[in-house]
Amino acid sequence: MFLPALTACSSIPPVSYSGGSAYSDILTGATAGGLQPGKSEILRERIARFDPEKLLSQPDLQSISLHLFDDLRLTARQEKEQKDSGLLVWSGKIEGAGGGKLVLVVREGFLYASVYLRSSIIQIRPVAALAREASRDYVVRELACPGKSSSSAPREGVCPDGGSGSGPTPGEIRLIELVNLEREADGLRVLGLSSRLTEAARRHARDMARHDCCSHELSTGEQFYENVFESGYPTSTVGENLAVGYATPEETFECMFASPEHRSNIMNPRYTQIGVGEVFDATGRYRYFWAQEFGSAS
């Protein structure tokens, strides 16, 4: 089995999983000063302390228990674990009547995690993600789940900028929604949906699926920006994130956001539009192929 990849050079050799262990209450500690929500989308926040290295040291995490807020403790049972030196990608199902899902990534000494509940999303984010050395201080914040009318959620079947092609798929919608939730929570404007960027993203995702690879250069020799311009997008300010091997938009987003290079595109204040391409090919090694195209057309 191969771990998923985020760029052409991040393909990781096979890893195996064995044994079983549980690591409970990985996120504990008293609130280190209350945080005041800055936007209506943030329901509540607090600072907590956490050591990601404890996760990496476990041979096989069958369950993870989280103490998120004083009134909220959750336990997730493993559905998927992928581990390599310094990298952990873990997802599991939340126990209990309410259900939900936990997606967790440890990368370069930092933890990134999201808990998807019925009516909210709880994120765990480093306080000092841009610092050279990892910190144990993390923001735990609960966001209201957006509805169809939310500015975070593009409408299925609608591509408003005049490009050709069909509207976004549910998976593409979800990935855009998660990008915009993160931007909103940090006070950035949401990205509008561009059908021209969608066209470029889908063409790139199809090309990766056809050749079972992850590369910013298409099989034709075109660079990603040439692919974007070929779709008719009217600007020279563009960016691209790629991911392969991640089955869900939630896993794809969490792994992208844990990467400094990909996060810089997601949180770039210059970008105003986005397009996402999602392709599934059961015959390949990676099977799932994702492309995000960013632009700033006025």
Image: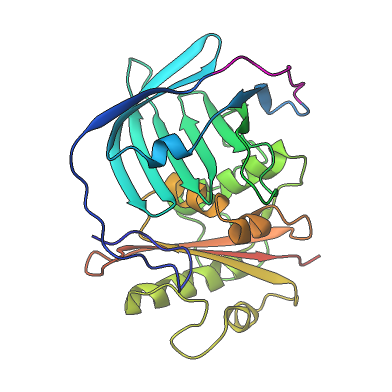
Q: Residue at horizontal 28%, vertical 40%? A: 59
Would residue 24 appear left or right of 29 to someone viewing this image? left
In the rendered structure, the answer to whether residue 35 lies left or right of residue 259 reads right
Percent of width and height locating residue 115: 47, 30
Magenta-colored span: 29-37
Q: Residue at x 65, y 81 (%)?
A: 229
Q: Main secondary structure of the magenta part?
A: loop
Q: In which image quadrant can residue 79 be found?
A: top left
Which quadrant of the structure image shows residue 102? Answer: top left
The residue sitting at 60% across, 37% down in the picture is 125
- Along the line of sight, the residue nearer the viewer: 109 or 167: 109
Residue at 53 percent across and 40 percent down: it is: 111
> Can see residue 171?
yes
Residue 153, compared with residue 283, is above or below; it is: above
Is 205 inside the magenta-drawn segment?
no
Q: Determine whether 159 is above or below 40 in the image.
A: below
Residue 250 to residue 268: above or below = above
Could you say where residue 19 lies in the image, as x and y percent from the top left? 18, 38
Residues 193 and 130: in front is 130
